[in-house]
Image (spheres, rainbow, N blue to C red):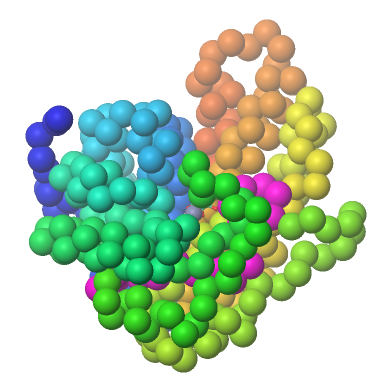
Amino acid sequence: MSKKVHFSELGLVNTREMFSKAVDGGYAIPAYNFNNLEQLQAIVTACAETSSPVILQVSKGARDYANSTMLRYMALGAVEMVREMGSNIPITLHLDHGDSLELCRSCVDSGFSSVMIDGSHLPYEENVKLTRQVVEYAHRFDVSVEGELGVLAGIEDEVQAEKSTYTRPDEVVDFVTKTGVDSLAISIGTSHGAYKFKVKPGEAPPNLRFDILAEIEKRLPRFPIVLHGASSVVQSYVELINQYGGRMEGAIGIPEDQLRKAAASAVCKINIDSDGRLAVTAKVREYLANHPGEFDPRKYLGAARKELVALIKHKNETVLGSAGKG
Ligand code: G3H
Ligand code: 13P
Ligand code: ZN
């Protein structure tokens, strides 16, 4: 195991102050997933240029893919790059969908400033117990913890749920009190991936359950709420992918106006992964189709990175409302 490091040594912050400002200000902090250099460069460039606080989000799969030591130094490099750009935005390094105490401890020990323990698929009391154990460890190092109640449809790492189970407002106060979590992920109709709803062509997706969100907000005033599965599944990317040899039929996401509405209320962290994947895939496909002789990865990954910067700026400015809040 590589040497222990505290997040403050990497120039990172936990989520306490950024969430409290977001709750008061009616906006949400963006949590963008990354697995590689170009995604990380695009995220921090776009957030520095829009002066938005940012949560850099790493899943278990991403950690396995990129190597945990490599990731720590990538995060350190990202912070230094942002400071060299003259920006002082707060940056959090967060474990997305942690599935065990061991994984969360390992992330705390390797410099993460926030971890999620996802016990949402467990029976309630087991979720409480596991989440409490993570909080007890993480809080010793001032690391923030996100818990989850309710199950999103789709894939949560290796766990595949056919149907969503909405968060029960009756459980939230008990869960937050017993576990001591700093934020709570809820299920109100979003889901992971690029196929969030089954609707007929031209039909609008169903609205998120804002009634459940309002009820949760009433029970937990000013408590930071997290929305997973919040990609809009940008249709121009899906069209480019299909135009240049891909096949993504019926891919559909959460309309931007619904995310804006959620961000204006108790939701203060919005998770986005699929839209970034779509932007990269669309641009790589387009570039390679139009430049069949090109074999320099900097060319096609550079085109993807440029698009990702534009996408993230757009989200910060017009969807999450986080631009200018860094
Ligand atoms: O919620 C899941 C995230 O999109 C991460 O996905 O486990 O394939 O890295 P992943
Ligand atoms: P999307 O698949 O909608 O981007 O959701 C990502 C997410 O919730 C990561 O935890
Ligand atoms: Zn998620």
Which part of the image, by quadrant, shows the C terminus? bottom left
Quarter where residue 219 is shown: bottom left
Q: Foreground residue, 228 or 175?
A: 175
Quarter where residue 308 is shown: top right
Q: Foreground residue, 100 or 224?
A: 100
Q: Does the magenta stretch include residue 200?
A: no
Q: What residue appears at the point 87 percent right and 63 percent down from the top-left corner?
A: 203
Q: In this view, does 235 lie above or below 290?
A: below
Q: What residue appears at the point 23 percent right and 31 percent down from the top-left corner?
A: 69
Q: Is residue 187 magenta?
A: yes
Secondary structure mostly seen in the magenta stretch: loop
x, y percentage for residue 314?
58, 57
Residue most extreme to the top = 293
Which part of the image, by quadrant, shows the N terminus? top left
x, y percentage for residue 21?
34, 77
x, y percentage for residue 16?
26, 70
Q: In this view, does 60 lie above or below 182?
A: above
Query: Does any portion of residue 88 appear in the rendered image?
Result: no
Q: What residue appears at the point 58 percent right and 10 percent down from the top-left corner?
A: 295
Q: In this view, does 208 lie above or below 297?
A: below
Q: Is residue 315 above or below residue 194?
A: below
Q: How many labels sit on residues?
A: 0
Residue most extreme to the bottom = 218
Magenta stretch, residue numbers = 180-196
Q: What residue appears at the point 49 percent right and 41 percent down from the top-left corner?
A: 158
Q: Foreground residue, 79 or 189?
A: 189
x, y percentage for residue 187?
55, 68
Q: Foreground residue, 160 or 235?
A: 160
